[in-house]
Amino acid sequence: MNLRKHDKLYWLVSYAAVLGLILPIIAAIVAPGRAEAQAPAQTMTVGVIEFRNDSGVQGDVLARFATDAVVIELSKSSRFDVITRAQLDAQMKELGIAPPINAVERNRLGEALQADAMIDGAIKAVEIRGSGATRRALVTLVVRMIDQASGEIINGAVQTGTAQARAGATTDDDKLITEAIDNAAYMAVNTMINYIIPEATVQNTIRTNEVMLNKGARDGIRNGMRMIVTREREIIGVVEVSDVDPDNSIATIKEQTRGIRPEDKARAVFQMPIEMKADPDSGGKSLSAKKSSGLSRITKTILGGLIIWGVVSLFDSDGTESVGGVSAEAGLSSYDLPTDAGTPGVRICWDAKKLSQGKNVLAYQIWRNDVPIPVIVARPEDGEAFDDVNARTVSYIVPNREEPTGYETNSAVAPGVQLGRPVKYYVSAVYVVHHPDGALYYETPKKATGQATPLPQIQLAGLRLPLQSSQQNLHSVTFEWLSRRGADEYRIEVSSDPTFLDPEYVSQPIYHASTSDGQPIRFVVKESLFTLFQSASSDQPIWWRIGARARGDKPGPIAADGRSNMRYIYSEINHFYPVEMPPGQPD
């Protein structure tokens, strides 16, 4: 690309690059004077790697301009010590890294630079709207800050910058776009500066799975907040805040590699926006680049509903950073057989094909939120596993974070899942990358499933009414069964076919407290069964069963065979017979 064909853009990019190099030096000279006036905030050392450009508009030009614009804005703040581009480029050359940089390379680069965090980003959309004095540019920019110790996002922003044509001035789309990038960078960095990352210190450990933190609601701590626990820059574990007071809080330990102890530091995991939509102005035009080298040759096409997807999924879209398609579904171990029987537990599924690009997977490791070690280790070709109530010995892989040239294999006993208690699972992959100098071993970030609540199957003895093989008046049939702890939603299914592939009757959801176990639940069905089974003879069995689930499960239990919308753990089956009705009176 010959940038000199576009003097204005070339000058702006060059200007930004020069400022990106000298502003950190100026900031270092000026900083002592500022320190006398006020106590400086804690400074983070950050490296900014080259942004992506997903807009389709002159990728390299705008990506570099956006990167430099963010560096300039970061350098203006005393909260960040920005590693210069010269240092960054030199370290990348020494490590043999070239853009685009993946998560593993980003981590290696951050370690070599001794950064507290690394910043990456992307231009997600570029638009030109209006004409003449109303002409304007809109650029949407995503920026995120990744903690070096944990690999978690700890800060970030999604902002759309705009630039309006000035009255009486000649409209210049190139200048409008670069001004919009500058404005988006300013707003994104300003958002990040104003966000104070909640941090706390572990005061005490409580029992075996809880800790007390020295910060509370007044310091921004809130219920459900996930926090990374570190000790001297090494990640120790993950906790989730469960109880908050004004000045302290209690957190449940979700993961730990070493025992969490007093004086360990906890830092909140930042929640990036999941989805943003562009301004639904019908006059909007999106921009896409032709096979030419200049922004002045950009084509304008009518935009029909631009959608900017969530930041996490955007950065994982190349399929190289985490395991995809993870889910957890409660059920019975015979889920692949036509019978509803077997050991209760949870089926965990993932997409075994997502990590195929350049990665040689050694094993998939399945973690449960109540155990600090993997509960299952699956083969590279597997795409699912089943966690049941039985304890088992697990041999799992621990790559060396400091020296990825090797890994350890540990063995421990993983307890079985507890019935009636909701759980979450996390799936990671251990993989090897082959280089000319040897093999390097890594583990992907853990990808979380939704909640799953394993339940024991309701046995035949728990199906109390109608009595087995009894005769029933179909005008009114009373059903009674015993509850299961953890289930708060039930359905009755009645069918002429014991396989229940297409049952004639399915009740509406029946709700009951999830804390009770073995409590009778009664429900009366009037007239419906008579209408549906009026042609049934008195010696024809009518089959029934109960489905149970926890409403908070996502996506829910394993779906019934051929009925993907029915996600319940079904009881054993029972049956009754219709009572023979007397013949009608003659006219």
Image (cartoon, rainbow, N blue to C red):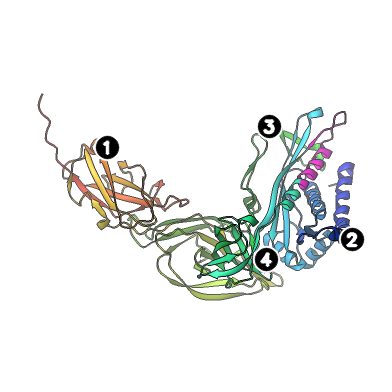
Q: Which of marks 3 and 4 is in front?
A: 4
Question: Secondary structure under badge 1?
Answer: helix
- Whether residue 361 can be seen here: no
Q: Which of marks 4 and 2 is in front?
A: 2
First along the sequence among labels 4 and 1? 4
Judging by the rendered image, the residue that carries numbered circle 4 is: 149
Seen in the picture, residue 25 relative to 298 is either above or below; the reply is below
Indicate the position of residue 406 as horizontal and vertical percent values.
64, 74
Q: How much space separates mark 2 and mark 3, taking CA atoms?
A: 46 Å
Indicate the position of residue 300 as horizontal and vertical percent values.
74, 34
Judging by the rendered image, the residue that carries numbered circle 3 is: 281
Crowd around label 3: few <14 · some 14–19 · many ≥20 (10 Å):
few
First along the sequence among labels 1 and 3? 3
39 vs 372, left or right, is right
Judging by the rendered image, the residue that carries numbered circle 1 is: 528
Judging by the rendered image, the residue that carries numbered circle 2 is: 29
Q: How much space separates mark 4 and mark 1, taking CA atoms?
A: 62 Å
